[in-house]
Image (cartoon, rainbow, N blue to C red):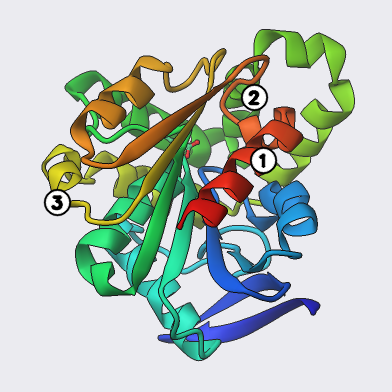
Amino acid sequence: MTSGMSVEVGGTRIAYTLAGAGRPLLFIHGYPLGRSLWRPQVEALASSAVVIAPDLRGHGDSAAPAGEYSMDLLADELHGLLAALKIDQPVVLCGLSMGGYIALAYYRKFSAGVAGLVLAATRVGADSAEGKANRERTAALAVEAGVPAVVDAMLPKMLAPDTYTQNPDLVRQVRDLMLRTSLNGVLGDLAGMRNRPDSTPTLPEIRVPVLIIHGQQDQLIPPGEAQNTLSGVPSATLALIDRAGHLPNLEQPDTFNQAITNFLKSL
Ligand code: MLT
């Protein structure tokens, strides 16, 4: 089964892709992205899982209310989406970057409904003072110059340096995907990420298997963050992907998908 649909979750219309059969696997995109980030994963993994890939509020085809999008609020909305889709089996969460922040918030709230965690291109710490100041500068840029200015400032860091010369089509696709984030989405995410808690104390509490995936050439979140996460979790494995930056699932989709397939088999 493959479909692109939407459903009302607590008053917010959430668009999603649903495909395949098997164990539920929920993909949570990062900032400022959308569910089409996961196209290579939906295509490859729907033969072994029920793949659910929503647009978070403010992104892609979902509604874009104003206000802060806290990681807890986004986790609640995902939980509401799964309930609306009548998915009651424990789910494997795969979150990339901000999606990883949300996956950890989800685990804190709904651990009984989680079968495994994939933390891709993410970090567990909160924003530093400098990081918070950057969020405020980016929000001011978004208000003054619009979402395209934010996208064009961020795009040169999204991918591995070689990807820009070797795969210009992918660079264009990523830019188009980023441009489908609304102004409310950019502002809501920035405020939510700025105020997110430190997830380090959550790591020793995790009772499900964890797969950490990171691009070796990630310019936004250095691979040392993946090592840091690995050292805090009781049962985790790390897949470092060469020739990949912040979006390893798009830059090296076969390697990324194989890591997830092996993880699903191990559960
Ligand atoms: C993301 O890709 O989700 C963001 O770069 C994460 C962040 O800004 O902290």
**Label 2 to label 1, Cα distance in Å?**
26 Å
Name the residue beneath numbered marker 2.
155
- What kind of element bears circle 2? helix
**Label 2 to label 3, Cα distance in Å?**
35 Å
Q: Is residue 205 above or below residue 6?
A: above
Residue 50 lies, in percent from the top left, at 64, 72
N-terminal of the pair, mark 3 or mark 1, is 3
Instruction: Residue 60: give its label.
Output: none
| Residue positioned 22% across, 32% down in the render | 125
Q: Quadrant of the N terminus?
A: bottom right
Picture quadrant of ligand 1 = top left
Name the residue beneath numbered marker 3.
205
Label pair 3/1, CB-CB below 8 angstroms: no
**Label 3 to label 1, Cα distance in Å?**
27 Å
Residue 133 lies, in percent from the top left, at 27, 25
Q: Is residue 154 above or below residue 28?
A: above
| Residue positioned 19% across, 33% down in the render | 232
Q: What amino acid is at disc 1?
A: Gln
Q: Residue furthest front?
A: 266
Q: Quadrant of residue 252?
A: top right
Label pair 2/3, CB-CB below 8 angstroms: no
Q: Quadrant of residue 25?
A: bottom right
Name the residue beneath numbered marker 1.
258
Q: What amino acid is at disc 2?
A: Leu
Of residues 168 and 25, the one drawn nearer to the viewer in this rendering = 25
Q: Residue furthest right?
A: 169
